[in-house]
Image (tube, rainbow, N blue to C red):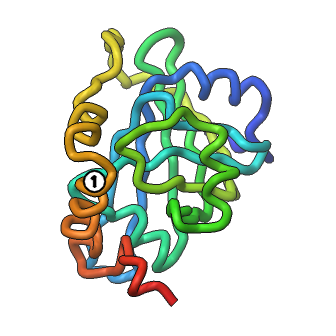
Amino acid sequence: MKLHPEITPKLARWIEQQKLFFVGSAPLSADGHINLSPKGGDCFRILGPKEVAYLDYTGSGAETIAHLRENGRIVIMFCAFEGGPQIVRLHGTGTAHLPSDDSFQSLASRFPSNPGMRSIIRIEVQRVSDSCGYSVPYFDYQGERDILDKWANAKGREGVTAYQAEKNRLSIDGLPALEQPSERT
């Protein structure tokens, strides 16, 4: 393993070529559930040598948002499924920026529009490491899935918002994730 003081230009080029990454977070409680989520599509951006962000799509849970609200801890992991073996981890502190937040629009301008978007996760990177990945298998990339886009377009903005209110309000451990506008102070 090698530690880097920041995301170097070489690592940035490699990260930008990856089609898939994983997001890990955990609550403070020892009884809480650790979360690990795969992410894909054109949803990851390097904002600076120690700052990244990704589009957070609507899903059946909102664990990452809940964990970030509670403690901010997050790790992003990229691993090569083609080419030379490599794993890169970005540890840091994250914040979920919701569409109602003042900072949302400036971040959103860096991403393509997506009907399934729920928030933008911005991470202040505190630790950058890479390792070999010698045991990661090869996989062939066949393309992006459009199922979320079709689902969100069929539901419409109001339907997606209603789904989020029902399914994404709390984490599986009962931590607050997405608040309704009337609940925000």
Judge whether residue 4 can be spotted in this image: no
- Quarter where residue 137 is shown: top left
Which residue: 29% across, 73% down? 169
Work out whether 125 lies above or below 71: above
Left or right? Give the position of 8 relative to 68: right
Work out whether 152 lies above or below 135: below
Query: Residue 43: x and y, percent?
Result: 50, 36
Residue closer to the observer: 70 or 75:
70
Residue closer to the observer: 39 or 25:
39
Left or right? Give the position of 110 relative to 17: right
Which residue: 60% across, 46% down? 108
Left or right? Give the position of 98 relative to 160: right
Query: Residue 177: x and y, percent?
Result: 36, 73
- What residue would you read off at disc 1? 160
Query: Residue 74: x and y, percent?
Result: 51, 60
Which residue: 80% across, 47% down? 5
SS class, disc 1: helix
Residue closer to the observer: 69 or 181:
181
Work out whether 141 lies above or below 27: above
Query: Residue 154: x and y, percent?
Result: 21, 39
Which residue: 54% across, 71% down? 72
- Quarter where residue 145 is shown: top left
Tag 1: residue type? Answer: Val
